[in-house]
Amino acid sequence: MNNAPRTVRLHPDDNVAVVLNDGGLPAGTALPGGPVLREKVPQAHKLALVDLAEGDAVLRYGVVIGRANRAIPAGSWVHERLLDMPAARPLEGLPISTVQPPLMPPLEGYSFQGYRNADGSVGTRNLLAITTTVQCVAGVLDVALARIRRELLPKYPNVDGVVGLEHSYGCGVAIDATDAYIPIRTLRHISLNPNFGGEVMVLSLGCEKLQPERLLPPGSFRLAPKAPAAPAPQGDAGLLGRPGEAPIVGHVRLQDEQHVGFASMVDDVLATAERHLQRLDQRRRETVPASELVVGVQCGGSDALSGITANPAVGACTDLLVRAGATVLFSEVTEVRDAIDQLTARAATPAIAQQMIDQMAWYDAYLARGGSDRSANTTPGNKAGGLSNIVEKAMGSIVKSGSAPIAGVLGPGEKASTKGLKGLLYAATPASDFICGTLQLAAGMNLHIFTTGRGTPYGLAECPVVKVATRTELATRWHDLMDVNAGRIADGEIGIDALGLEMFELLLDVASGRRTWAEHHGLANSLVLFNPAPVT
Amino acid sequence: MNNAPRTVRLHPDDNVAVVLNDGGLPAGTALPGGPVLREKVPQAHKLALVDLAEGDAVLRYGVVIGRANRAIPAGSWVHERLLDMPAARPLEGLPISTVQPPLMPPLEGYSFQGYRNADGSVGTRNLLAITTTVQCVAGVLDVALARIRRELLPKYPNVDGVVGLEHSYGCGVAIDATDAYIPIRTLRHISLNPNFGGEVMVLSLGCEKLQPERLLPPGSFRLAPKAPAAPAPQGDAGLLGRPGEAPIVGHVRLQDEQHVGFASMVDDVLATAERHLQRLDQRRRETVPASELVVGVQCGGSDALSGITANPAVGACTDLLVRAGATVLFSEVTEVRDAIDQLTARAATPAIAQQMIDQMAWYDAYLARGGSDRSANTTPGNKAGGLSNIVEKAMGSIVKSGSAPIAGVLGPGEKASTKGLKGLLYAATPASDFICGTLQLAAGMNLHIFTTGRGTPYGLAECPVVKVATRTELATRWHDLMDVNAGRIADGEIGIDALGLEMFELLLDVASGRRTWAEHHGLANSLVLFNPAPVT
């Protein structure tokens, strides 16, 4: 690693630069072609390149991230207490589809080993998911899951695991309220995630508000046959059902009269699970084009290097994925809100730009109803990590979306394939890591990239998560949690595009079955639903 | 069991009665002193005792539960489609503290075997709880919990178990929004539940919004000593700390620099847990008066028998508990809203009545903000179980509170002992079983009674839950899930007061260590926080 002072100025208009050196830079450091530091500036934090007067605009990414609330001499540490945050960009008068799409020739010949589903989607894992209608069944499900893992999974070696889709929704909620469609369609679409093979096993109680027919509307599903599946037709290795056929549903309802005693409930869950496992176990990976990937990109526990190392590299990877015909979901409303003008400008059509504006307006109103606004996004860790406010954080967040035109917008809980969307999509979700991940699963995500600067041991049971560290120190310390070290960019060891290509190739490996660190340790966070409607 | 037609009319003004027989009563059944049934009426459903004209008030519990929306001849099944629901009772002009408290002589000499805590509270279980600041740590905690159960608990036989207090709050939320105090104080107070012995072990990430100092304000806690606890002083068997001393806190922060690699995180959690376990293992049960019980009462999966069998028996038990000096928490705003006049009349003081009104008004506004109202409470199962609407459901729900004067009100997440409250308390919570249970745990609950008519396998890891079936059929079918069969009241086998006494004695046994069915099977539902503020 290079030990000379290293700083980065991201845009020619910027009057601040960011310190890259691990451990920061001490007072007195003379920056090549720049000021002498008046005080210590921590890694990922900003220094003033010129003297700033009170009220002067502070620019980073060529964007006003705030105004100096006192005079700041050149060489000073520019931290969040010195900046007043600008007001949110109005949602009127935005540039609409003004950006010429960059030249992005298709990337051909990239493939991975995936599980083809009858609905045309492709799984990167072969999982049995047990969907639940209501939290009431969670205790029984946990007991059953432990038995399935112990007694059944060893008999079905081609199945990667069993996942309980537990959640806090389903009853005790205002299920007919205006916004209740969001958690309901989220659960429906998660049940149909490509990693579950088009098999849907439902565990319900009986008296709950979220009845199975409301979760999975009748007519769009076939009941699971009681007998094991017939061998797959030739040339259609492991496909469950014929192409275009509706997914298979198995259902256990705890209040049904045949359940006499607790053991009979658990036995019934196991028997139903085994019928699904028999079918899933017949599946085999086959070569599929990279265009079948649906990659959710997200950042969490961000620092100021997120926007310099990991997120730009993800952006480069996003461009490669889009060129290969894959779908990429970027998200987090409050983390793009301040860059809305950049995004409407990149929208492929004015209609898409308008959908983006509508999502921002909806979320502005949602936050205002609760007495809050976008500034509630930033965390103590963000600030300690050098991010002064949500404007600066947003500029570093949106770079994950690369440079492709934005080809579509998904509301929270919507599914890309249901709307016929492919390519670079904006999936409007809260920025909470778990709510965003949950909604990206509903959108059809079969692979997840997650960048972090402060460090979080994030994982999902439903989908592999590739974790990217923004800093070498974190990547070294959390050597068996971080899958990629983007700190090498700050260390001058690799360029952004080269790391983007490395990630792209890693994603194809992981999609083909290579395990992530989170999978190795069995790390999985909870599903967390976005329910903007009241509970009762 | 008696096979003659059995119906119940609860108030002399009522013009409907409820069928008690398992399986209902067929058309043509002649009711003694009443009409002949014109159609089949299912168990727990209502029949018209007289001819009702369109617009006539339908009375049950002496209360107007709706108006007939067509003519209903005597002997008809009166189901929810025939009733128009009345408007909510206005919150002005209510009777305030008008009810003369019934003669309730103190009950003396009842005791149980409990764990005394330094703060004066008493546990019914001796559990290690690991509190979390944020969902980010849940994956690591799950791995650590599995190792604690396998490697540590066998060495500490006096400890009943280890509980991870996982939740979806802590980051990605508007933590400074108006209503954010509710989830924060809920988590704080749950960490201090009497069943956790005044030991608080915190697992945090580092960069999250809910910093440990915000969860547990400094000054009110002592750091855990690194060495095992000294033997307890004589005559103070197993008390951790001296009376009045602040609780002990142990803390592991995953982002701390000493954590190099995943295993070091898990090892640190185990080492910290073991120091708490060494202390908890020194505790012994001792005889304490029944007045140390803090019993949360709740109903879920209700039917029309809930208000005839199980809930009135719980009400009788509540009266015994209050007479013994114990604290009883009744809850569920939308399930008392329509009986607010009965409750303000029973308030011990006008100030308490006003607090009750304030809680109702707050919840009315909260529901209205989300485009909903109290009528969103009832479920398909409630209606199938004979409850036509929330008015009828509420009348059957409040009887759990018995007849004592209401001695205090807790807002959501408040703790009874912090406010110096004892006796019959109204803890204002949503009616969702899991949110209500979570908030009752925060209020200091050390024992839980839960009634159900449709059947739910509810359980909590933090506190024993005694489940009461409203019907013999359910109690028989779920013979190893239901702890009490209140269907015996409908069967004419036991009276309400006698069953209340039986429950009271069972509660003392369970408080002393007798395991409930949920504990026997290891059934536990998730904590679900009430967060009326936005996510970001």
Image (tube, coloured by chain):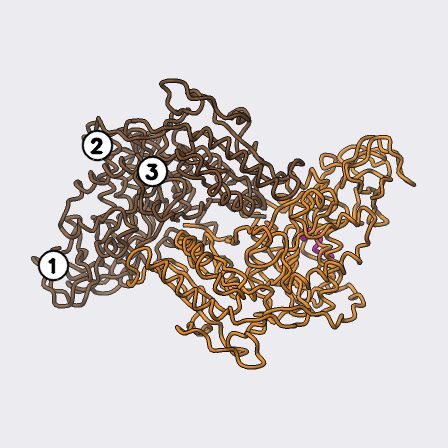
Chain colours: A orange, B brown
Q: Chain of mark 2?
A: B
* Identity of the residue drawn at 46% across and 37% down: B129
**Can you name the residue that lies furthest to the top here?**
B234
Q: Is B187 in front, or is A358?
A: B187
Foreground: disc 3 or disc 2: 3
Badge 3 amino acid:
Leu
SS under mark 1: loop
Q: Report the side of A346 relative to A16 (left or right).
A: left
Q: Are marks 1 and 3 in contact (CB under 8 Å)?
A: no
Q: Are marks 3 and 2 on the same chain?
A: yes
Image coords of residue B284 (percent x, y): 36, 28
Mark 2: few, some, or many residues within 10 Å (few <14, many ≥20)?
Answer: few
Q: Are marks 2 and 1 on the same chain?
A: yes
Q: Chain of mark 1?
A: B
The image quarter containing residue B351 is top left
Is residue B394 something one can see in this rendering?
yes
SS under mark 3: strand
Residue annotated with mark 1 = B3
Image coords of residue A419 (percent x, y): 59, 70
Q: Report the side of B110 relative to A221 (left or right).
A: left
**What number is the disc on residue B100?**
2
Badge 2 amino acid:
Gln
**Can you name the residue that lies furthest to the right here?**
A33
Mark 3: few, some, or many residues within 10 Å (few <14, many ≥20)?
Answer: many
Q: Is residue B203 magenta?
A: no
| Marks 1/3: CA–CA distance | 36 Å
Is residue A426 something one can see in this rendering?
no
Q: Are marks 1 and 3 on the same chain?
A: yes
